[in-house]
Image: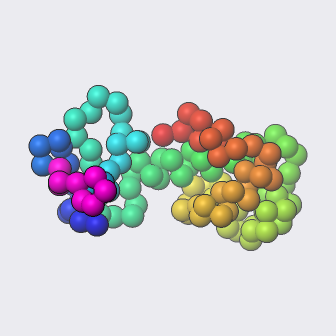
Amino acid sequence: MRIQRAGSYVTKENAPAPGRGGQSNLLCLDAFWPLGSDQWPFFASTSLPIMEHIQKALGSRIRKLRTERGFSQMRFARRCGLHPSYMGEIERGETNLTLASLILITRRLRTTIAQLFDGIG
């Protein structure tokens, strides 16, 4: 994967040529960028502002569903097999949620990943 410096932009004109299989070798965040934009920011950092927004919104959604179902944070964390402090970090949007943890949480909340992300991003 090619890395660009923080703050540089990828446009249709300067995008790299597709690699094998017709796939670009450059990470693109167009799924979370407003429709109609002709530029997509690419940051080499892992603390992307848009990702932080998604983490916080997802954490809030998890907390809301957990409380609606009558679970305390500690009881719910134990049911998921997660440490209570990790569950707190997830709900505050302070950590990157692993796919395995996301699947555990959605199953315990009796929802789907699609429903959990509905309207986020």
In the image, residue 5 sits, relative to residue 51, either above or below, namely below
Q: Residue at x 62, y 50 (%)?
A: 59
Q: In which quarter of the image is the N terminus?
A: bottom left
x then y, percent, for residue 86: 67, 67
**Camera sees residue 16:** yes
Say which of 114 and 39 sits in front: 114
x then y, percent, for residue 120: 54, 39
Q: Residue at x 65, y 64 (%)?
A: 100
**Camera sees residue 9:** no
21 within the magenta span: yes
Q: In which quarter of the image is residue 64?
A: top right
* Residue at the outermost left position: 13
Q: Quadrant of residue 98?
A: bottom right
x then y, percent, for residue 23: 30, 54
Question: Taking 39 as reference, is 113 left or right?
Answer: right
x then y, percent, for residue 90: 63, 59
Q: Give the range drawn in magenta.
A: 15-22
In the image, residue 114 sits, relative to residue 47, either above or below, namely above
- Please identify the dominant SS of the magenta region: loop
Q: Residue at x 62, y 41 (%)?
A: 114
Question: Taking 22 as reference, is 9 left or right?
Answer: left
* Residue at the outermost bottom position: 83
Say which of 48 and 29 sits in front: 29
Query: What is the total number of numbered labels drawn onto the structure image?
Result: 0
44 within the magenta span: no
In the image, residue 98 sits, relative to residue 7, either above or below, namely below
Its colouring scheme is: rainbow
In the image, residue 85 sits, relative to residue 12, either above or below, namely below
Say which of 7 and 110 sits in front: 110
